[in-house]
Amino acid sequence: MAELEGLQDFLAVVENGSFTAAAQTLNASKSHISRQVSRLEGRLGTRLLTRTTRRVRLTDMGRLYYDRCRSAVDALEAVEADLADLQARPKGLVRLTAPGIYAERFVAPALAEFATEYPEVEVELDTQMSTVDLIEDGYDLAIRMSSLTDSSLIARRVEARRIVVCGAPEYLEKRGVPDSPDALTAHDCLTLKGMAWRFAWPDQIREVRVRGGWTSDNGRALVAAASAGLGLMRITDYYVNAELARGELQVVLEDYEVGDAATWIIYPNRQHLPTRVRLLIDFLVEALRGRYSPGN
């Protein structure tokens, strides 16, 4: 394309620091490189480089043009690399983390399906409830129940979730049923580490501070405590659907439930994401979407 003529020469001059070095890199003459860059500047109607006998410097417009073009060329090279990679069977290790029962009930079966399609991809699944640092701890992706807070990460929404506050009927009979989130200050609240108690009022979503004598990073531990009548808990409903159906637990404050809870796949913002990782992310988004629904 005529629009791209001289672009490779310009990039080579900038990245090699001189016309001479660029000519050696591209296996072309210095005069050819110079002509190509001059034609590019003429076509753009602006000077991109300031030339002296000792060095070449980018002008302000040249810096802008270089940054944009470098990104575009990188993207094209990534596409070519992806196509070449996809022609070979993806293989290698993918490390991911997903929380507790969600990992057991939904993620693990999806990973088993993925393994049958891509047998040369190794998978390491961590089911701890605590939030890990993906980059620091060497994970390729995470499935999380909270939205993206780190701007260096990418988040893909999988599906909505329902989060409920519930307790045992005997506890509610003894301590009373809270009629608003503010009434929780008079209750024993069983808390899941890292999970804020958020509620929806007509005009805002607000976080309510709660207290209690039981905290855990394991959802099933909270279910056991709540079922024993030790207090109220706030938790994703797939932990407690069986107990709710049997009448062992009872939902309260339904009118204040937030509607923005969701499951997310989060991964580092890498320019060249390995094909095996990208394939698994795409697979999980489709496999998990709709697998969980309230009542499952």
Image (cartoon, rainbow, N blue to C red):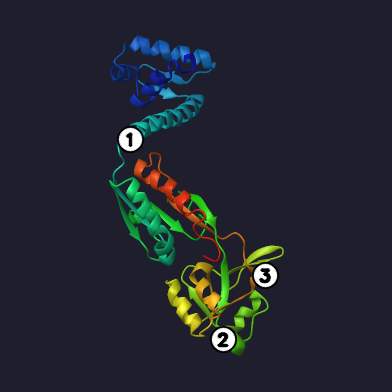
Kindly identify the residue that appears in the image at 39 percent across and 12 percent down: 34
Q: Amino acid at mark 3?
A: Asp
Crowd around label 3: few <14 · some 14–19 · many ≥20 (10 Å)? few
Name the residue at 33% across, 49% down. 116
> Mark 2 falls on what kind of element?
helix
* Residue underneath mark 1: 85
When the figure is inspected, residue 96 is found, relative to residue 91, above or below; the finding is: below
Q: Which picture quadrant has residue 51?
A: top left
Rendered view: 1 above or below 257: above
Amino acid type at circle 2 is Tyr
SS assignment at label 1? helix
Q: What residue sits right under mark 3 in the picture?
A: 255
* C-alpha span from label 1 to label 2: 58 Å
Q: Which of these two is toward me, 77 or 234?
A: 234
Name the amino acid type tagged 1.
Answer: Asp
Give the quadrant of residue 160: bottom right
Say whether disc 2 or disc 3 marks the residue closer to the N-terminus: 2
Task: Find disc 2 in the rendering and name its residue.
Answer: 171
Between discs 1 and 2, the one toward the N terminus: 1
Residue 61: horizontal and vertical position, in percent?
Answer: 51, 25
Say which of 61 and 220 sits in front. Answer: 220
The quadrant where residue 211 appears:
bottom right
